[in-house]
Image: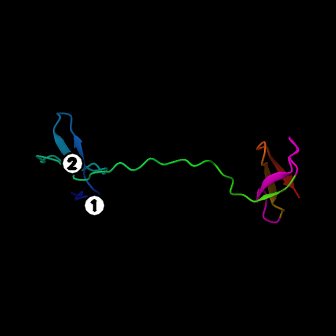
Amino acid sequence: MFCPKCGSILVPKPDKKGKNLLSCSCGYKKKDVEEIKIKEQTKESAQIEVVEEKELLPLIDAECPKCHHTKAYHWIVQTRASDEAPTRFYKCEKCKHTWREYK
């Protein structure tokens, strides 16, 4: 059923006396309801399986300042004004240390 005032769907709620009524977010209440049944049934969905985390970033030759490993993941972000050079971020493949380069 829909609200005659605003057209929103009416939601079943018990009143202070324990009787069922249909109410709307606009304040409309329909009190002369004998029986309310919700026909919608939900099915339990399968659990979401978490697959091991993989980096989807390009792997390049860059030396980590922390562990001196020679491979790092690379991405670019425009952190300043558009007329300035973007900031390059690196993440070490081995120790996961993240650093940036401003060139």
Q: Amino acid at mark 2?
A: Leu
Q: Residue at x 79, y 61 (%)?
A: 81
Q: Amino acid at mark 1?
A: Gly
Q: Quadrant of the N terminus?
A: bottom left
Q: Residue at x 76, y 44 (%)?
A: 96
> Which of 21 and 27 lies nearest the eye of the viewer?
21
Does the segment drawn in magenta span residue 67?
Answer: yes
Tell which circle, 1 or 2, labels the residue nearer the N-terminal end: 1
> Which of 49 and 91 lies nearest the eye of the viewer?
49
Q: How far, Cα to Cα, is label 1 from label 2?
A: 13 Å
Q: Residue at x 81, y 57 (%)?
A: 87
- Marks 1 and 2 in Cβ contact (< 8 Å): no
**Vertical relation: 59 (above or below) 52:** below
Q: Position of residue 51 (x, y in %)?
A: 57, 49
Q: To which residue does mark 2 refer?
A: 22
State the mark number for residue 75: none
The part of the chain drawn in magenta is: 63-83
Under tag 1, what secondary structure? loop
Q: Position of residue 22 (x, y in %)?
A: 21, 48
- Please tell me whether the stretch drawn in magenta is mainly helix, strand or loop: loop
> Which of 61 and 42 lies nearest the eye of the viewer?
61
Q: Position of residue 50 (x, y in %)?
A: 55, 47
- Direction from residue 8 to residue 47 in the image, left or right: right
State the mark number for residue 7: 1
Does the segment drawn in magenta span residue 36?
Answer: no
Q: Position of residue 13 (x, y in %)?
A: 24, 42
- How many marks overall? 2
